[in-house]
Every structure is written in structure tokens, then in C-alpha cells.
Image (cartoon, rainbow, N blue to C red):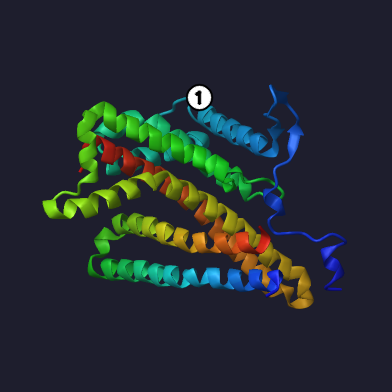
């Protein structure tokens, strides 16, 4: 019984991350096909737009259900920016809000069975992290000019320590996009793989499978928390980087 | 050594790194409990910082796990 529950072919827990072409498009030798990853991104953006448009359609003094949800998201991100960057951060609100909602909806849609998590691909997360990194660097140079390089000198460090500290600071600055991208990607990949591996124990154990089944239930709850937390962490780190670029130290 | 055996041993070795993250997460939450015990009024403020610290530490564990998975399935 335990052997034939797996069916004829072997299912890898990494199968869910496979990218499938839905509409093959090729322009000038470049493959720009519409994939299931792109489809999930379109669905995520459509849901966000729907939520915000419906939520702000009639701006009542006493918010209805939709308006309450939209206001909750708005206030959450607005508070986040106010706490980390301060008042100058307000003009970056649209960027942070878009980033947060896109990642949050991407992570949450990935929790739906048989769907696809586009944030579990490093190409997607690294593109977002690189946009943040380049944007913050350009912002810092535009605001401070060459004085921006003083970011690499920690305050209160004696001058004979500079040859040691500056390379460390430069490397830690350059590793920002990698750690930002890897964190989101690894969390989503490992979390979803873990769910699949544990789900595989359920049929394999037969009647005793009720134990891993209960565990999978709890794990799904944890994954929901992680999905939210990772969007939050991405947003808050972006805010901290913007704060660094605006205020140096 | 056979490649398959080496892969399994390598994946097992790669997840040793999770020990550090386990200690780290324990530290994060013990510090959180201590802080709330000393000043319960600061709970909300400390909690967001705790969650941030938890996510940052947990990411390190997942780096190790991803390496293990790449070795196993890659």
C-alpha cells in the first residue's frame, strides 16, 4: 500500500517550482513566453488593484469592510516608513507599498494548493533586490554627492582602523542585494519544500499518517506567518537602506 | 566513494549550520521574554523588533537548508 501511493512516476518535492510555458512567444531569438510565473504575477497585481480600487471607491467616514482592509494595509506601511525613515520617507511610500503588497500577495498566492510561488525564484527576488539596491545608491549620490562615501566609515572609529573597517563596510554594502534576494527566495523555497516533504509522509505511514497530517496543518499556519513576515522584512530592510542613504549615519 | 553516498553525506553535513540558527532564535526569544518581563508596557514595540530578528536569523538556517537541497536534488 505504502509503495503504490506514490503512483507510477516519482514526484520530487521541487516539482512545484517548475516553470511552464503557457503561451510561447519569441521575439528576435529571445524567449519571452508567458509562463505560469508571469500568470501568477498578473493575478497578484490584479488582486491588489481590485482590493485598493474597491477599498477606496466610496470614501466613507466609517469604513466598510473593504475600506477597512485597504486602510489597514495603508496604515501598516505608512507606520513602518514613519518609524524607520521619518518624515522624509513619505515620498517613498508608493514604492515601499507596491513592493510590500506585491511580495505579500505573491507569497500568499503560493500557499494556495497547486498554484505557483513566483517569489520562490531567485530571478524574481534578485531583480527586486537589485532595483532597491541601485535605487538606494543613486538616491544617496543624488542627495549627498561624493560625501555619500562617508557611509563606509563607521563613526567613532580611530583612523588607524580605517584600512580594516572600510573594506568590511564596502563588502557588507555590496552584499545587500544578495542577502535581500536570498532571504526571500530561500524562505519560500525551503518552506514549500518542507510542506511537500511532510505531506509525502502522510500516505506513506497509512493510519499513523494522522500525526504528520496534523503537523502539516500547523506548518501551513507557520508558512502563512513566514509569508507575511518575509514581505515585512523585505519592506523594512528597504526602508532601512533608504534611511542610510538619506541620513548617512 | 560512490556519488550518491557522497551526496547524502554532503547534504547531512550542510544542515549542521542549522545549529547556529537554533541557538540564535533561542537567544532572540529569550531576550524578548526578558525585555517584556522587565517592562511589559514596551511589549508591542519590542515584538516587531523580535519578529525582525527572528526572520533575519531564520534566513541563515534556510541558507544551509537550500545548500542541502541543491546538493540532494541539484
**In the displayed structure image, the side of residue B38 where residue A51 appears, left or right:** right
Residue B6 in which image quadrant: bottom right
Is B3 located above or below residue A38 in the figure?
below
Is A67 located above or below residue A16 in the figure?
above
Camera-nearest residue between B47 and B8: B8
Q: Chain of mark 1?
A: A
State the image coordinates of residue A221 (x, y, percent, origin top left).
Answer: 56, 59
Residue B59 in sight: yes
Which residue appears farthest toward the top when viewing the image? A28
Tell me the quadrant of the picture where the N terminus of chain A can be found: bottom right
Q: Residue at x 68, y 56 (%)?
A: A14
Residue A105 in sight: no
State the image coordinates of residue A89 (x, y, percent, origin top left).
Answer: 29, 34
Q: Which residue is mark 1?
A: A57
Residue A201 in which image quadrant: bottom right
**In the displayed structure image, the side of residue B24 where residue B37 appears, left or right:** left
Is A122 located above or below residue A90 in the figure?
below
Q: Secondary structure at mark 1?
A: loop
Q: Residue at x 50, y 59 (%)?
A: B63
Camera-nearest residue between A149 and B1: B1
Label 1 crowd bin: few (<14), some (14–19), many (20+), radius 10 Å? few
**In the displayed structure image, the side of residue A198 where residue A50 appears, left or right:** left
Camera-nearest residue between B58 and B48: B58
**In the displayed structure image, the side of residue B21 where residue B8 appears, left or right:** right
Q: Residue at x 38, y 41 (%)?
A: A238
State the image coordinates of residue A146 (x, y, percent, origin top left).
Answer: 22, 31
State the image coordinates of residue A204 (x, y, percent, origin top left).
Answer: 77, 72
Tell me the quadrant of the picture where the C terminus of chain A can be found: top left
Amino acid at each position: 500500500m505504502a509503495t503504490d501511493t506514490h503512483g507510477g512516476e516519482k514526484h520530487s518535492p521541487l516539482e512545484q517550482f517548475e516553470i511552464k510555458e503557457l503561451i510561447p512567444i519569441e521575439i528576435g531569438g529571445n524567449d519571452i513566453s508567458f509562463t505560469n510565473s508571469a500568470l501568477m504575477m498578473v493575478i497578484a497585481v490584479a488582486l491588489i488593484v481590485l482590493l485598493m480600487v474597491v477599498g477606496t471607491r466610496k470614501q466613507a467616514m466609517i469604513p466598510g469592510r473593504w475600506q477597512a482592509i485597504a486602510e489597514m494595509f495603508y496604515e501598516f506601511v505608512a507606520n513602518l516608513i514613519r518609524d524607520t525613515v521619518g518624515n522624509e520617507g513619505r515620498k517613498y511610500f508608493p514604492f515601499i507599498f507596491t513592493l510590500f503588497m506585491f511580495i505579500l500577495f505573491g507569497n500568499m498566492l503560493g500557499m494556495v494548493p497547486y498554484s505557483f510561488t513566483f517569489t520562490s525564484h531567485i530571478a524574481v527576488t534578485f531583480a527586486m533586490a537589485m532595483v532597491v539596491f541601485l535605487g538606494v545608491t543613486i538616491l544617496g549620490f543624488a542627495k549627498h554627492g561624493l560625501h555619500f562615501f562617508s557611509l563606509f566609515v563607521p563613526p567613532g572609529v580611530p583612523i588607524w582602523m580605517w584600512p580594516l573597517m572600510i573594506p568590511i563596510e564596502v563588502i557588507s554594502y555590496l552584499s545587500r542585494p544578495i542577502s535581500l534576494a536570498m532571504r526571500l527566495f530561500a524562505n519560500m523555497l525551503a518552506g514549500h519544500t518542507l510542506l511537500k516533504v511532510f505531506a509525502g509522509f502522510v500516505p506513506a505511514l497509512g493510519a499513523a499518517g494522522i500525526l504528520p497530517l496534523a503537523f502539516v496543518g500547523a506548518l501551513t499556519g507557520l508558512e502563512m506567518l513566514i509569508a507575511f513576515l518575509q514581505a515585512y522584512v523585505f519592506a523594512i530592510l528597504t526602508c532601512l537602506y533608504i534611511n542610510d542613504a538619506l541620513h548617512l549615519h | 566513494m560512490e556519488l550518491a553516498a557522497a551526496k547524502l553525506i554532503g547534504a547531512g553535513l550542510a544542515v549542521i549550520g542549522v545549529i547556529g540558527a537554533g541557538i540564535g532564535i533561542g537567544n532572540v526569544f529569550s531576550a524578548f521574554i526578558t525585555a517584556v518581563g522587565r517592562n511589559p508596557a514596551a511589549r508591542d514595540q519590542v515584538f516587531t523588533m523580535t519578529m525582525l530578528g527572528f526572520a533575519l536569523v531564520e534566513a541563515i538556517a534556510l541558507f544551509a537548508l537550500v545548500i542541502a537541497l541543491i546538493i540532494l536534488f541539484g
